[in-house]
Amino acid sequence: MYWSQRPDYRIGTSGATYINGELTIIQITVRDNNVEQALRALKKKMQREGLFREMKSRTYFEKPSEKKARQKAEAVRRARKLARKRAQREGLV
């Protein structure tokens, strides 16, 4: 199977990227020839979309058991953070 035929990651000719079946389009406009500002905006958008994290995770193969363990740890982290925020809002902390 060729890279472009993989269903989880395809790059189209229009600049659109399909990641896990989702269409992701990142578009930045350069105003007043200020390329540095546009680059900062692009990096911020890529960070928000999680593209850096995905590129890093795709560097090496992750075994399904490792992926499951990582996702479980992330869920625990999110739950603890949510509980901490709730407790702070209620004045318990």
Image (cartoon, helix red, strand yellow):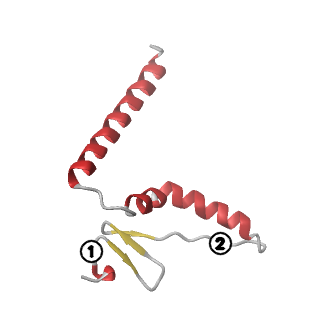
Q: Which residue occupies 61% across, 70% down?
A: 28
The reply to whether callout 2 and callout 1 are in contact (CB within 8 Å) is no
As helix, strand or loop, the secondary structure at mark 2 comes to: loop
Query: Which circle marks residue 29 in the picture?
Result: 2
The type of residue carrying mark 1 is: Pro
Which dot marks residue 38?
Answer: none
Instruction: Tell me where residue 44 appears, x and y as whole percent.
Output: 58, 57
- Name, please, the residue furthest toward the bottom: 13
Tell me the amino acid under the disc marked 2.
Thr
Few, some or many residues within 10 Å of mark 2 (<14, 14–19, 20+): few
Give the mark toward the camera: 2 or 1. 1
Q: Secondary structure at mark 1?
A: loop
**Residue 45 occupies which quadrant of the picture?**
bottom right
Residue 81's x, y, as percent?
41, 31
Q: Which mark is residue 7?
A: 1
Residue 30 drawn above or below residue 71: below
